[in-house]
Image (cartoon, grey):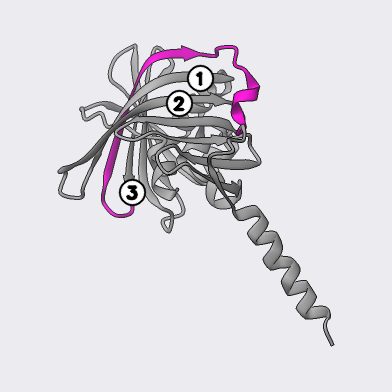
Amino acid sequence: MRLILLLMMVLAVTTSLATETEVTGSERLSTYLAKLDSYEANFQQQRYSSARDLMDSTSGRFVLSRPSQFIWQTFTPFEQKIVSDGKTLWTIDVDLEQVIINDVDERVENAPIYLLARNQADINNLFSVEYQRLDDNNEFFIMSPRDESGAFEGLRLGFVDGILKSLELNDSLGQLTMITMTNIRNNPILDIGQFSYTANDEFDIIDNRKIIEHEDSSKDDLTETP
C-alpha cells in the first residue's frame, strides 16, 4: 500500500527555469489548490530505479473530491483500485479477488496524495516550496519535506494554465516515479457514492480495522484481569 500511495503523486519535468522565493511558491500553490474542489483524469505512470532503469509502467484513472475523498485505479498491467471516503481506505485487488480495509491514519494522511487537500499553513509547515516558471502557461512547484525521515525526498507538481498536469516523486530509496495526466476534468460534478466500496460476495475481506479493535479490546481485558 505504501508504494501505491507514493505513486499517486508524481511526474518529472527537467528544464532550466527562473526561481522565485519560497513564500511566493507556497502562496501561489495554495491559490491553485484553493480553487480545486474536484479533479478527474487518466494517467500514465513510469517508475525508475535509482540507476534510472525503467522498472514498470502503469496506466489508470485518478478521481479527487476535496478535502480527502479519492480513487486511484490502475488498469494495466493489472487491475487494482484504492478508494477512500476520508475515514476508510479500501484497497481492491481484482486479480486476487481481495479487499483490504484500513483506517485513514497519520501514515495515509502524510502520503503525497493528501497534499492536494492542504492549505497554505499546512504546506508551509510540511514543505519548503520552490516556484519555477517555464513560460506564462507552464509552472512548477518543487517541494521538499521539512521532515527528512519521511518516505519521499522530493515532489514536483506541474501546472499548465493553472491545472495540475504532471507529478514527480523521488522516494527515500532513490527511485523516481513519473506521472502525466490526460483527459483532465477540472472541478467536475462527481457522484460521491463512488468514494466507498460496494461489497462483492466473491471477494475475500481483510479488515485491519477489526484486527486493531480486537487487539485493543484484548489488551483492556488483560489489564482488568486480577
Q: Amino acid at mark 3?
A: Asp
Question: Quarter-wise, where is residue 45 in the image?
Answer: top left
Please name whichever residue, 26 or 67, is drawn nearer the observer in this view of the structure.
67
Mark 2 or mark 1, whichever is nearer to me: 2
Please name whichever residue, 79 or 40, is drawn nearer the observer in this view of the structure.
79
Q: Where in the figure is residue 98, as x and y percent of width and height? A: 49, 44
In the image, is residue 201 part of the stretch drawn in magenta?
no
Mark 3 or mark 1, whichever is nearer to me: 1
* Residue bearing mark 2: 62
Q: Where in the figure is residue 189, as x and y percent of width and height? A: 60, 12
**In what element is the residue under mark 3?**
strand
* Residue bearing mark 1: 39
Please name whichever residue, 2 or 12, is drawn nearer the observer in this view of the structure.
2
Q: Which residues are magenta?
A: 171-197
Marks 2 and 3 close (CB-CB < 8 Å): no
80 in relation to 107, above or below: above
Q: Residue, x 44% and y 30% (percent of image)?
A: 73
Q: Residue, x 27% and y 42% (percent of image)?
A: 176
